Amino acid sequence: MEGSDFPPEYDRVQQEDTDAQIAQQLHEEEEERVRRERSPSTRDCVVCGDSTPVPEFPALVECNHQPEICRDCFKGWIASELESKSWDTIKCPGSKCKVIMQHNHVQQYADPDIYAKFDALSARSALNDDPNFRWCRGPNCQSGQIHVSGEEGNIFRCVACGFRVCVIHEDTWHEGETCEEYDYRRSGKKERDQKLQEEASVKAIGELTKRCPGKRCNWPIEKNEGCDHMTCSKCRFEFCWICLAPYGPIRNRGNSAHKKSCKYHSSNIA
């Protein structure tokens, strides 16, 4: 036979098989294309190494690098940074990225308890920026409020626990003392002044009060004015206020009976 050694029917069947194979290949390629479109590509997390679909990598709009860390590792990063750093210095975990994470980033990607802690710290910082806001310093109290010197002046009184504090001295309220009196006491000047007053009082008492030199009397006698001839109101003993010499010998012997140091002694009278 000229041409093919096989009958025309055989060639037709062969062509149909070839066409069917081509069609099957095209069908499989199309299915693979559709599958790839429906199944997103993956990427290895640079922290844990797991292959993760790209859309599950957190991405910050402020960053200009491709996401590198999976969602779970991103959560862990935020928690670790918040534990070891200030809440407002947490950066994107991307390599060499300097973008600071904002409130909405933490809210979106952190665990609820970590976000709650971050939110509380950021709120506290915002309140601290108000010069009139003060936190209660009472034990176990975490309340705070705006305090403007008004009717109570320097006294901060917590509306939650009632704890009071002086806003000038940032110390427990000095009950019964004004700020000036508190400063006076804490400086030590009050104690020094009191000591000087006591010493002055002792000196004044020594000058105005003496013990009766009468036998077994020792009664305190105060002299405000008048002459130096004294008579004890208790034992009626008479004596010289200056030298405590008894007046009996003075009457008998004259001024020589005074002690020589006394201004009334004969040798001291011109």
Image: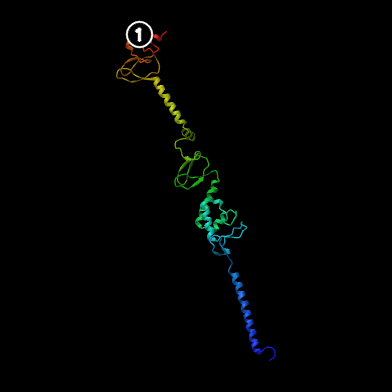
x, y percentage for residue 238?
33, 14
Using residue 222 as the reference point, say whether residue 101 is left or right of it. right
Res. 67 image quadrant: bottom right
* Residue extending farthest left: 216
Using the image, determine if residue 46 lies above or below residue 26.
above
Residue under pointer 1: 254
| Image position of 258 (left or right of 155) | left
Quarter of the image where the C terminus is located: top left
Q: 40 or 187: which is nearer to us?
A: 40
Q: How many marks?
A: 1
Q: Position of residue 230 (x, y in %)?
A: 35, 15
- Identified by mark 1, the residue type is Gly
Q: Is residue 211 above or below residue 55?
A: above
Q: Residue 203 is drawn in which quadrant?
A: top left
Give residue 94's position: percent from left, percent from top.
58, 57
Q: Position of residue 63 (x, y in %)?
A: 61, 57
The N terminus lies in quadrant: bottom right
Which residue occupies 60% across, 70% down?
Answer: 36
Picture residue at 43% right of the left edge, 28% below the top: 195
Badge 1 local density, few (<14 within 10 Å), some, or many (20+)? some
4 displayed left or right of 80: right
Residue located farthest toward the bottom when viewing the structure as drawn: 1
